[in-house]
Image (cartoon, coloured by chain):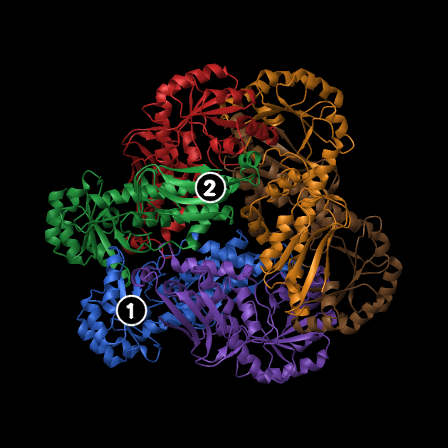
Chain colours: A red, B green, C orange, D brown, E purple, F blue
Amino acid sequence: MADLAPLPALVIDPIVRNALAEDLGRAGDITSEATVPTNATARAEINARQAGVLAGLDCARAAFRLVDTSLKIAVLKADGDTLQPGDTICVVEGPARSILTAERVALNFLGHLTGIASATASFVQAVGGTKARITCTRKTTPNLRALEKYAVRAGGGVNHRFGLDDGILIKDNHIAVASGVTPALTAALAKAGHMVRVEIEVDTLDQLREALDGGAHAILLDNMDPATLRQAVAINAGRAALEASGGITLGTVRGVAETGVDYISVGWITHSAPCLDLGLDISF
Amino acid sequence: MADLAPLPALVIDPIVRNALAEDLGRAGDITSEATVPTNATARAEINARQAGVLAGLDCARAAFRLVDTSLKIAVLKADGDTLQPGDTICVVEGPARSILTAERVALNFLGHLTGIASATASFVQAVGGTKARITCTRKTTPNLRALEKYAVRAGGGVNHRFGLDDGILIKDNHIAVASGVTPALTAALAKAGHMVRVEIEVDTLDQLREALDGGAHAILLDNMDPATLRQAVAINAGRAALEASGGITLGTVRGVAETGVDYISVGWITHSAPCLDLGLDISF
Amino acid sequence: MADLAPLPALVIDPIVRNALAEDLGRAGDITSEATVPTNATARAEINARQAGVLAGLDCARAAFRLVDTSLKIAVLKADGDTLQPGDTICVVEGPARSILTAERVALNFLGHLTGIASATASFVQAVGGTKARITCTRKTTPNLRALEKYAVRAGGGVNHRFGLDDGILIKDNHIAVASGVTPALTAALAKAGHMVRVEIEVDTLDQLREALDGGAHAILLDNMDPATLRQAVAINAGRAALEASGGITLGTVRGVAETGVDYISVGWITHSAPCLDLGLDISF
Amino acid sequence: MADLAPLPALVIDPIVRNALAEDLGRAGDITSEATVPTNATARAEINARQAGVLAGLDCARAAFRLVDTSLKIAVLKADGDTLQPGDTICVVEGPARSILTAERVALNFLGHLTGIASATASFVQAVGGTKARITCTRKTTPNLRALEKYAVRAGGGVNHRFGLDDGILIKDNHIAVASGVTPALTAALAKAGHMVRVEIEVDTLDQLREALDGGAHAILLDNMDPATLRQAVAINAGRAALEASGGITLGTVRGVAETGVDYISVGWITHSAPCLDLGLDISF
Amino acid sequence: MADLAPLPALVIDPIVRNALAEDLGRAGDITSEATVPTNATARAEINARQAGVLAGLDCARAAFRLVDTSLKIAVLKADGDTLQPGDTICVVEGPARSILTAERVALNFLGHLTGIASATASFVQAVGGTKARITCTRKTTPNLRALEKYAVRAGGGVNHRFGLDDGILIKDNHIAVASGVTPALTAALAKAGHMVRVEIEVDTLDQLREALDGGAHAILLDNMDPATLRQAVAINAGRAALEASGGITLGTVRGVAETGVDYISVGWITHSAPCLDLGLDISF
Amino acid sequence: MADLAPLPALVIDPIVRNALAEDLGRAGDITSEATVPTNATARAEINARQAGVLAGLDCARAAFRLVDTSLKIAVLKADGDTLQPGDTICVVEGPARSILTAERVALNFLGHLTGIASATASFVQAVGGTKARITCTRKTTPNLRALEKYAVRAGGGVNHRFGLDDGILIKDNHIAVASGVTPALTAALAKAGHMVRVEIEVDTLDQLREALDGGAHAILLDNMDPATLRQAVAINAGRAALEASGGITLGTVRGVAETGVDYISVGWITHSAPCLDLGLDISF
């Protein structure tokens, strides 16, 4: 990653603190309290067990830090880095109890976000050499959107809207209730200030032409096959940003990218990317 | 589902409220405000597009209700019900803007939790006729544990610990730092009150025998092949609850279940189950 | 107001609840408890004592409702409506104690937001007949931004960015550290996805030309006099949205608007608009 | 300021953290991330552009600290100090991105609170040499009361009640519903413990006499002209604290003060004081 | 109770909601879910098993309502009422599961607050016929102060300060560091606005005289025996409110009251009053 | 205390922060601000004035630290240590204002939790030499359960359930609605996963036999006299954990313990233990 700006502690800490509270409950880590001597220390490595692209290291660090500020964490990889099985991501040293208490929360964040970054990276790699950029959707896990969008960036993707409020995206239902592409677009452009982009979803090339005439800044081409997408690119002639969307998989994404669209949005990378396998290996 | 107790609004509402705040941001649904007339009403169905087992309906209902208390929601399915593609889960009627504003949050909860219930159910079905019960782990999405554990129940699974505090589970690292199975177990049983169960992870049959002698209430058999598990079941002779764990998949779970273990824990059903495909179909 | 979408209770209620907690403290309204009989009822009108444009009625209603759900509130005006001195905005009936307890919080919201809407409206009126739209800034009262931006809309203005995250605005300091307009713009456009607008601040017409060549979506013309603004409009020739900014007052805004710029941003309408004078007149 | 006790971080930090969250949104400062190199450092001064009295410096410092603990902040002025245009208030050094990210929130607090302190100071100065003290009201911006009351102290004013719970103030409506000054006062004094002061609003000198006979600790003289106030002071003869109130402006306050009242309350200093103009001047 | 103003839901609900969350944890009432049929209904009475004075009924009601809005609650007693063993306080009807789930939280509030009200009432009764009023202190259970102060009122007591901010109470340590009664009092009166009462703690009659000369509004007579208190009352001659304090018990309070002091403060009624015994008797 | 694991700051800090906010209110410690010079420093000892067992020292330390990070705290005792009157628990040095501001909150936590630990320890001591362990109940002060359960551990007790969710406890009402011991137990064991203990309350020896036949892990013997308890122990013959409960006092607990039960639960130690008397002695 050339330049992936870290998420601020202001964003990360409250989420990690809640996750620790969720895991510690009212009685805390009763297993470690019973079995680990107070003064035992340990050295733990977080190691990748699968290949992928790292994301969420600051969340993992926050989990250890919020449990015990005396833990020392040495970082060997950075978010956005490629992982191979066996790669050590970071090393944590200090009280054994604290390491064991924070372990699961740290790994849950790291596995989940690295899973998303890795899924994104596989799509990014698949379209390599084309101009298409992989973008995410609002199909994210509730209450983790800022982290998951960050993981998409770590994987080389580019973010779509963060919420209903930071961009207008007119979908088929809006068009239906607004009685057509043109009235919907007219109303949206009238409402939008100069800092709001207006995108509209179209199903046909006729709708595309109408959207371009209406002044859309971006157009979502919904469920079009590559041949139609290619026509859409030609009709657009560089006027609006074109986003292909709808059931695109790792198997089909290259064909979509080669049509010349600007963006390909993939819900799967946030709503269904499997966790990446990571482990904490400890020595006392 | 014979009897799946619903999660109380006390648990659901704050999580759904946060998710709506996350999606609405500071400016709200600017697309619907621009394109949907204030007085437009609509009727929307949430329909399954894949087969599975439903979970999360109360979260979806909360999303609609918290956006607009005037929306009417008719429920056609219940959590724990089997879904076929095309099944209608619920019908929402009322102001079109409100339905469109709540749509994505409602579907994000429903797709995520139904994905987990469906994944669980596929494992439960695979072990049908054996005495083995499918159980989850603490490998859950941060801050959604109560909901995800509920989805496991909806899918026919049984819950493992909810956190570090409601049960003692002595893992390999605890054993290592405590200098063996027996001292770890002794310390844990001494600390545990009469309402705390003590489980211990073992890698070998010798460790199993030591754990049984030490009085463990439950034993996690880590990464054992079916033949070894069968021996473990024989050695145990009904004394402790036996839990098989470690990389078990839909392909291997039946073989594990047939060894006679009591529980099979599967991290995948919460950390990596894909979202189930659902859609909101609207008519004005 | 043609169509001013209301803020949802999800946004309003937590803010009003905090404000009530702030005013009630730990002991509540000890004056009313001491002096007002439990069963006394009253009828109260909120009346305008100055001319202006109304905003914040839902906040005022929430204050009464959150103190006592039995209060009945009849609304005679809507946000965005013009007020004349003496106009009755709403009538509240019910327990006298509850009305007196909620009074100040209700009026504090209503006076503050109506002040902003009225200030905005005075600027909007001053540019009437030109194409210029009045827009706000991020110079808002801490933790009230969503409400204040809403009051700007109620006053006929259009919103600028809601925060640092929903649009790129490259200011003089960014240009300085990025070594010029072109590199800053190039970097920004590369980072921005297709739903992010990129605006850049320029001080000179040369910078304006460079910004247009660089593909800026919008350009903030900082502290230019009307003659220069007129040249800027000519140079732009409709390519980017043009925003005039910098110390513009009610006395100067018309001259700026007549230059043909698209937007005029005014920090004063949110950071310094005086409260509009309103009173609660009660009868028992 | 002889001795202005600072607000504790316990009070300031949560409010500033919310304000930062409000400005950073879900995606953070995307402009600085795009245009400012990670390793760029800067030196920034916060400079006054108007004369006034400083308040809110700890809020501004908190904004910088909560964004980036590595920022170094040197303070040249203290809250309560007089500012002249061009005065440097503080200097911030460190990562350029962090300074730019925190800038607006820091200035919004500082401008707002310095505006209130300056407005207060202008009233305090106007009554210089009299015994009258300037006091604030509960007409504050929702959820900022503790900060605004602090700014009043910074400007040389003295605080009135912080909420409905820390003092009894019987107003005209309470008197009306309690059937007169005497019964209202009797009820209030019976309820009040020995740590609660009882003030009552009177419109006439007859009411004043009744209030004094009833044992009021303080009396609010509502909308009386200087001549009447002077009579009130004579009638009171030092028994109760006298507060003049009602539409008092910078133009009229001296005349009021010279009547010999003890306190003059001015809502305008908190609900309508304009922001003081401050700027952040940066060098790289 | 002549007129005990209820605490608003704004105060009660968040505290009760937290207490329910504390008790329900992440998995809820697993006992009732396992053993109580979904459709079972019940009728439950909350009955007093000891004599005392009721407080906290609204907290108990909130516990039932927040668990299940369909529960019907009939109230037979009011806060401030005297209880005899066997008295029925309220009757709850509806789903049996919901009643059993809310039971403990409801009783914990009711028993704790009724304990405080009853303890207060026993002191109030002991001083019956004297002018002395029983008052509480800031020695309350952390985070329950508003509720406990309310229970003191329900028991017939009068509240002292709610916190450090709503009254000045100069104690021995303040006097020591301020170099004496007179300088401490002078500084306090100078700082206090007209709505702040100033009380000072004295150990001797000489200090009392100094405090009266200094203009204290109230004087705390610390650990004085009845004979000395009687002298203090004579010296005071009605000038300041006199509060006796320091290790006063039910056995000694009458003697203190008969000295003629105005207030007697008792920490025990909030920090150590035992829970009153109450039970929930249920029929199906 | 051999090994009492401390509560993490994650648990303690938010509770102490709320308690400080409760005490500081909106205006803070106005007494110390008025009377204590900014630069005055002090040395304060917290001293025991009664014998007991210490708990809550980390809460007291947090109170001082959260008010002023510059305070230095030297700890002379640890939670679980025995206290004699006059023992110094800790010494705090630094700004006098900060010490006085934090004093009451620190002492409120320390007195309350030490009271519980001391009460627990008196019961533990009373059963010394028997195998019976003293356990707490869910009769705790709302929102302080984690702290109070910790104080029970500090006093040598062992914790019962932390909430409704971490163990099944079938009480008389559950048995009644489930139509008997056997069906209730069967349902509970079927629902419980392998990490959940199932306890059942019995009133008679017949019910005890039925519960043992039904496979209960633990049995609560409700309100049985020592003779009956002795029979229960004989019948049980080591199969289930036996808990005696019901109105057990310091006077009767030894007799109960000598019957051979495993646990004795005492609600009084959390719901009614008096505060232990502690004082802060300061020198300037």
**Image x and y of residue A229, in percent:** 42, 19
Could you tell whether A81 is left or right of D189 in the image? left
Front tag of 2 and 1: 2
**Image x and y of residue A209, in percent:** 51, 19
Q: Which mark is residue B43?
A: 2
Q: CA distance from mark 2 to mark 1?
A: 46 Å
**Image x and y of residue E59, in percent:** 49, 65
- As displayed, is residue A4 above or below residue C215? below
Could you tell whether B218 is left or right of D160 in the image? left
- As displayed, is residue B210 above or below residue A177? below
- Give residue A113's quadrant in the image: top left
Q: Secondary structure at mark 1?
A: helix
- As displayed, is residue B69 above or below residue A178? below
Residue at the (64%, 67%) spot, across then down: C33
Q: Secondary structure at mark 2?
A: strand
Dot 1 corresponds to which residue? Answer: F175
Please tell me which residue lies in front, E258 or A54: A54
**Image x and y of residue B158, in percent:** 27, 51
Q: Circle 1 marks a residue in which chain? A: F
- Give residue C21's quadrant in the image: bottom right
